[in-house]
């Protein structure tokens, strides 16, 4: 599948366009070495998961995780549940 078409409706493309200023900004991140976890609430809409997966693939040291039981608003609605996941991630690196 064409890379542009795969990302055209995703959050990853919007991230690139809004924050990095160009469509092929993923090339900037090829040398990034910091671990990254792209976490999405398991109850989030499919397009959110698709965008998160595309962003995780774009970053060389990233992984995607679907957090069971949470939705897109987890940071505001369930900070303790998300906080545990963030803490566990930092303990692993």
Image (tube, grey):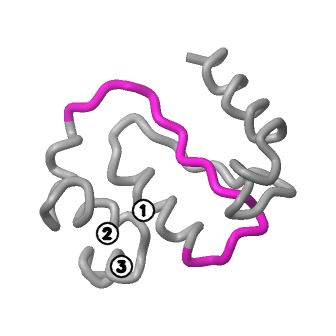
Circle 2: element type: helix
Measured in 3D between alpha carbons, the distance from the residue under mark 1 to the one under mark 3, in whole angstroms, is: 8 Å
Q: Is residue 18 left or right of residue 10?
A: left
Q: Which mark is residue 62?
A: none
Q: Which residue is mark 2?
A: 13
Residue 84 point in image, percent of width and height: 78, 30
Q: Label 1 belongs to which residue?
A: 54
Percent of width and height locating residue 83: 74, 33
Q: Are marks 1 and 3 in contact (CB under 8 Å)?
A: yes
For the residues labelled 3 and 2, the Cα–Cα distance comes to 9 Å
The residue that label 3 is drawn on is 6
Q: CB under 8 Å between callouts 1 and 2?
A: yes
Q: Quadrant of residue 19?
A: bottom left
Q: Quadrant of residue 55?
A: bottom left
**Which mark is nearer the camera, 1 or 2?**
2
- Mark 1: secondary structure: helix
Q: Residue at x 33, y 40 (%)?
A: 60
Q: Secondary structure at mark 3?
A: helix
Q: Earlier in the sequence, mark 3 or mark 2?
A: 3
- Is 51 rendered above or below residue 60? below
Which of the two labelled residues, at mark 1 and mark 3, occupies the earlier sequence position? 3
Q: Position of residue 89 (x, y in %)?
A: 64, 26
Write the start and end of the magenta stretch as one range. Answer: 31-47
Residue 68 quadrant: bottom right
Residue at image position (40%, 82%) is 9
Q: Quadrant of the N terminus?
A: bottom left
């Amino acid at each position: 599948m064409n890379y542009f078409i795969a990302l055209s409706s995703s959050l990853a493309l919007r991230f690139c366009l809004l924050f990095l200023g160009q469509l092929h900004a993923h090339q900037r991140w090829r040398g990034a070495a910091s671990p990254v976890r792209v976490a999405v609430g398991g109850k989030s809409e499919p397009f959110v998961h698709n965008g998160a997966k595309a962003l995780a693939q774009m970053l060389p040291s990233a992984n995607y995780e679907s957090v069971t039981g949470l939705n897109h608003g987890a940071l505001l609605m369930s900070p303790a549940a998300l906080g545990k996941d963030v803490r566990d991630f930092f303990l692993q690196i």
